[in-house]
Structures are given as structure tokens and as C-alpha cells.
Amino acid sequence: MKSFGIYTLANDVVYDQLVALLNSIEVNVSTDIPVCIIPYDNRLEKVKQEIITRKNVTLFENKSAIKTWDNFVNQFWEAHSRARDSKLSRPAWYQGFVHRKFAAFDGEFDKFVFFDADSLAMKPLDDIFEKLDEYDLVFNDWEHKKPRELTELDLSIIEEITGLTEDEIRPKLHCDSFFGSKKSLFSANQLEEFKKRAIERGEVEWVRSKSWWSSSGLFSYMTFPGNLKIFNFTRSNKGQERTGNCADADPFVNINNVLYNEEGLKPIHRIHYMNYSSSDFAKLCLGRDANIRYKHEFLHYRFLKEPDKKPQQLQPPNLLTKTNEFLDKIVKKVKLKFM
């Protein structure tokens, strides 16, 4: 058993993001920290080839744990009113495997930090591992600050059922794109208890219908009850620890290819490229421009070990490409609306 390490979730679709993340971990966290990749699905040919080249990177092999989480999550969402009332079966993209990141709780590291693959590590993780001496879960996200109507857990339902106030509920809300925790935090018996409460007591409805398949909403539900000790850097009493992390929303300053919070030049744990598609990153790596903030930082880490392959210039899309991409977006929006 290893005392600490990093997990991420990936397959060949996010290969470019994975390589960039691994390179950023080597440079900004440690060259020796072990990294374990949890397979999103079986599309792993390029991932496995990449692992061969890295002494400290492995593939998560506990298939039993992955199956346990698959079964738990599918039964959880199938109990939701959105699933029961739908005239159509769950759309294919709602049956994805983002939740497999939770198999980290059944992995080999006593303490770990999970990074979504569409992230870049920006500093060492010592402060997180130190916090895990005192806390069960450590986060660094602003989920708790979302407007009331946008939180993935329905505050009104929870207030009515539990008697808790909004101020008491909000500290329990968090994301699942980046977190530190410990092995075996959730046992098989606990998952059964979660499922029993969610189905028999209707607590599955705590997760809003618009985000009924959200792994982040599920994670907040799982950590809501009990005596788990949670720390979120964005709620720290130390202002230096409260930073942004989202590429599409927060302003950062680049100093030698390390990003800092623009206000106060605070060190950030990671930059998260949420809301950008893997296809846009693939375009960047082929030298085609894409509307991604901090794209040059991504390219720096993606081609850190292959500088000769890094695009020297990004070609803007022509009119035909723009038109096709616009139409693709329209089609996707229509599908989402009707499904």
C-alpha cells in the first residue's frame, strides 16, 4: 500500500489533456509522486502506451470496485423521478462513467488527490495532504457560492426535510473535479445505506431534476449526512488560500508557465478547463485555433516532452469550418432539448 498519490479519470478521447496533466504534475507537483489512471471506459490504447513511458504512472486495475460504483450509481439515478417519468430511456451521454472517479476510494493510496483530466497542476499538494491529517475530505471549489437556483442539490427540498437553514447547507456543497481524501472512506455497507435512503425516503430528489445524472450532485449527497470533516480552501479564513480555478471564468497571471490568481498573485492548486470539449483541445494540438482561454499554457504542458511537435502558429478556422461547428452546436442543443 502506498501512503499517498494522485488519481485521474481518462481514456483515449482525452489523451491530449491527460498528457498535459501528467506533465504539469511532474513539473509543478513532483517527479516521483505516483499517479493512477482510472479508466473511463475501454478506449485505452493510447493511454496504455503513454503509461509505458512513465515510471510513476499506473492503470487502476480493481475492476470489482469499478463495477460496484457502476451498479450503485445506475440504481441511484434510476430511482430519480426524472428517470421514472421520462417517455424515453436515459440518453446515452447520461449513462457515462464520470462517477468511476469514486473508485479512488477503493484504490491503493492511503491519502490521495483526484484531478479531472482536463486540468493542469500548478503547485505541490503538501497543504492538502497535511489537511487530511485532520479532515476526511478537502476541496477547492466554489460550488457553495452558486446562486440558489443553480446549486445541484435543491436547497428548498433539503430545508423542508431537514430543518437546516441555507447557511447550514451551503458549506456541505462541493464539486468533484478536484478533491483530496482517504482510502475506504465509503464502504460497501455505506453505499447500500445511501441507496436505501435515496430510494425508500425519496432523498434522490435532493438532486435537482436538471442535474439528475450529475456526479457532483451525487457526491454532495453522499457527503451530506454523517460526521465527515470537510475543508474547502475557498472557505478558508486565510485569504491567501482562496483562489479561482476555472479557465473559462477566472483571471490568472502567468509567471514562467505557472498560473497565479490575478488578485494578490495567490498560488493556485490547478486550472480546470471545464466547459471546453476534448475535440477543441485536439484541434489545438493539430495547430488549429480554438476558443479556449489559457490555450498557450495548455500547449506548453501538452508538448513539454515533444517540443518539436508543438504547433508554432495556430491557424484560424475558415468560414466553412465555422459554419459546420455552429451547425453541430445547434444539433446538440436540439437533442438535449428533446431528450
Image: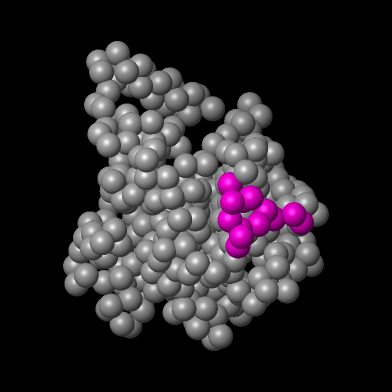
| Residue closest to the far front | 308
State which region is magenta: 50-62
Which residue: 34% across, 54% down? Answer: 246
Figure disc tally: 0
Residue 44 in view of the camera: yes
The image quarter containing residue 192 is bottom right
Q: Position of residue 234 (x, y in %)?
A: 36, 71
The image quarter containing residue 190 is bottom right
Which residue: 28% across, 78% down? Answer: 240
Quarter of the picture containing the N terminus is bottom right
| Residue closest to the far bottom | 134
Residue 162 in view of the camera: no
The image quarter containing residue 135 is bottom right
Q: Position of residue 300 (x, y in %)?
A: 34, 49
Q: Does the magenta segment cover residue 227?
A: no
Which residue: 27% across, 23% down? Answer: 317
Q: Nearer the viewer, residue 201 or 25?
A: 25
Q: Position of residue 186 (x, y in %)?
A: 70, 68
Q: Position of residue 2 (x, y in %)?
A: 68, 74
